[in-house]
Amino acid sequence: MSNILKSIPIGKLLRAENSQFVAGCRVKELETPALGSLVKVRLEDNSEIYGLITHILINDDSLVRQLVSGVSIPSEYTADNRYNRNLPVEIHVLTVGFTQNRLISHRLPPRPPLSLDHLFLCEDDDIRAFTAASDQGYLRHILRMQDQPVEELLAAHLAQAKTLHEEVGDFAWYGSACQKLITLLRDDYPRLTMVLDVLTELENV
Amino acid sequence: MENNLDNPLISQIGYVTGGGLEANLQVRLNVQPQSVLEGAFVVIDSNNWRFYGLVTDLRLTAIDEQYATQINAQRFSVHLAEMLNQQTLYTNLAVMPVLMMETGPAIDSPEYAAWRQTHTDEQKPITVKTVPSHHAPVKLADRADIATIFGEENNQNVFRVGSTREQGHPVCLDLDKLVQRSSGIFGTTGSGKSFLARMILAGLINNDKASTLIFDMHNEYGIDTTSSDTGVGVAGLKNKFSSKVQLVGLGAETNIGGQRPDFTLEISHNDISSEDVLQLSQALNLKETTAATLDALESEFRDNWFTEFMNMKVGAMVENEEGKLEPAPDSVAAWARRAGVHTGAAEGLRSKLTRLFNRPYLKNSPASNGLKDIINALQAGRHVVLSFGKYQSDLDYLLVTNLITRKIRDAWEKATNDFNSSKTKEPRPLVVVVEEAHKLLNREMASQTIFSTIAREMRKYYVTLLIIDQRPSQIYDEVMSQLGTRISGSLGDEDDINAVLSGLPGRGGLRGMLAKLQPSEEVLMLGWGVPMPIPIRSRRYDKQFWIDLFGEDRQPLNMSQASRLMGFDNDSD
């Protein structure tokens, strides 16, 4: 059931560069993507660019401003504004790797995707394959992010991936991801301890 | 070594991260620090060379101090903390590189044949002259490595003195090398020093390349005794080696712990020289004028001076023809006047020497020439334990050891000169074993006693010293620095530790090791006679020791057992 859902495109690309891109989607489509989800864009040559949702942005427009400043808003106005709005919800994606000829790489793709390319949520098998490849090297892209709550993003992503790996009996994946994070961040004491705080919190839930 | 080749990871404890020859090598440990002890013998393989070194320090460190200052397991989940600690906290070893040996490429590699052609000789360890590369793997030395450096036990000259502390690999001492130069065994009371000495003496006697003369001040080496610490019986050398060892008692009536000596030693007055007396200056509190008085005595009476001086009377007066009192002709004063010596000085010396005149083992004409018997036995390849019996004062010890050693020096010098000039028989090497050596070799005495001469230059006359002492700091530096092999049990005093290390490289690292030796269990071997310093768990001097040494649990044969064995059924021993 969920796989069918995820194979449905969740949006189309607005703009892109090598290391990140932004897709727009309708509010209706917003039920499935979540912070930290692994998404991909399929290019014409059948290669796929993988990314992680880092940021979901809902912009206002002049109508919303007017409505917000009104005294009371009828519920059908609210519904109409939400589902038929002119401005898309922006999904910001961090590029974390790509596949070419079915080979997974955690390097940046040679070219960014193009506008109006379709953005898909990855299926479970896809996520398992991508996150387990190349010694979890894709984590370095996440840690390089500035001006974003990296720890929260990591926690969201790891929680999701951990569950998926453990569903198929792979209990080691999470441990080696933690090892990798410590290796990458051990020279940055404040940042690493913050990440570990979040992971500890995650494990205690 | 074979095991390591099969699985190099098992024995690898870390890798080289820095350092050098001057400072020690830095090694990052990748096992728990408790699996390596200070003083551990490690090997480092790097580009066809194998380096041998000694761990001189272990230091806890972190890639960032902040990781070490908080308890990570309290803040993070247990497995995260474990991973974090593993990656950020580690132990650094300081390794003192000592030796290196070219090992060549691996035997099964294609380069090996070419290398072998240019290196036909068996490779030998040499003093370290370069350093291993970065990240060279560090392993604890295995049995084969230790045998490469310290030799393979053969119950002859390569003698096992103990084992490594971590893995219990046997560590040996080359006894031939030990006796080539003077050596020392040190340690505080209770450090196991005399057990160690007994063991090494047993090894020396068993090896039988050199004769040993043991000045047994406290009657503990010759006969079977009981350990004061454990109450367990301790085998003496005489009973184990039988006729190979001669037990000599000082004085006619001496019996040593209920055992009759092989012969007794009484010293003839004629054998005492002025030199022997001068060496007692301190013990007898002699004045500076003594030398002049003794010279006069010796020049007048020659060898008989001691007897003559003893027979002179102090203060005896007679009335002369004029009715005046004057010194009697047989008085000290009369002799002094005759000889032109200060009367007061002569009389003072005479009264001070009374202590010597009263020694029962000093005889005008002893029944046998024990001194000669000792020298003969030693030259014939026997070993002599001279027990002091009831004569245990410093005066006895100083007098007798000096006198005998002086005679020995004369005998060996003569033998060596004969050998050099006319190629007669090469002199039998001799080790003189001196207990409480600081009494003979302290700063004040060293210039006077014969022992410092032996320590310094008697090597070329085939005589060396084995010093056993608990206060090495009291021994004259010049003598200490001459000691080839030094084996030390635990020492508490800073000065003693420095003394044992005097004249050796890498003192800084060894100092801590010496201070932390486990009393009565561990010793540190170092110096010229051992390829590299190493702390070891010393071998036990027990029943098993003798079984190992003799190959079976036997008392050495005495005459009656031997004759029975040969078919003569008599009991006339």
Image (spheres, coloured by chain):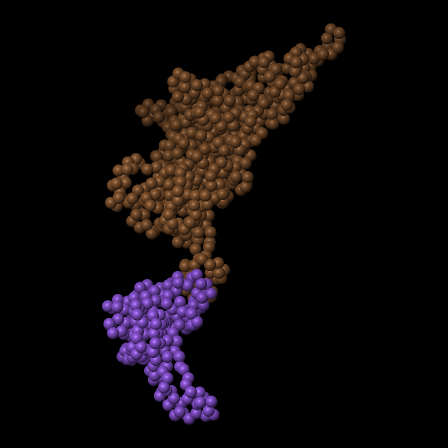
The quarter in which the N terminus of chain B is drawn is top left
Chain A, chosen colour in render: purple
The quarter in which the C terminus of chain B is drawn is top left
* Residue displayed at 73% across by 12% down: B325
Q: Quadrant of residue B322?
A: top right
The chain that appears brown in the image is B
Would you say residue B39 is visible in this rendering? no
* Residue displayed at 55% across by 39% down: B495
Would you say residue B103 is visible in this rendering? yes
* Residue displayed at 38% across by 18% down: B423
B95 above or below A87?
above
B219 above or below B97?
above
Q: Nearer the viewer, residue B422 or B22?
A: B22
Q: Quadrant of residue B412?
A: top left
Residue reaching furthest to the top: B321
B293 above or below B159?
above
Counting every numbered tag in the picture gives 0
* Residue displayed at 45% across by 40% down: B524
Relative to residue A197, is residue A42 drawn left or right?
left
Residue A66: image location, x then y, percent: 44, 89
Q: Nearer the viewer, residue A169 or A202?
A: A202
Residue B168: image location, x then y, percent: 39, 44
Relative to residue B463, is residue B349 drawn left or right?
right
Residue B134: image location, x then y, percent: 38, 49
Residue B5: image location, x then y, percent: 30, 47
Residue reaching furthest to the right: B323
A43 above or below B508?
below
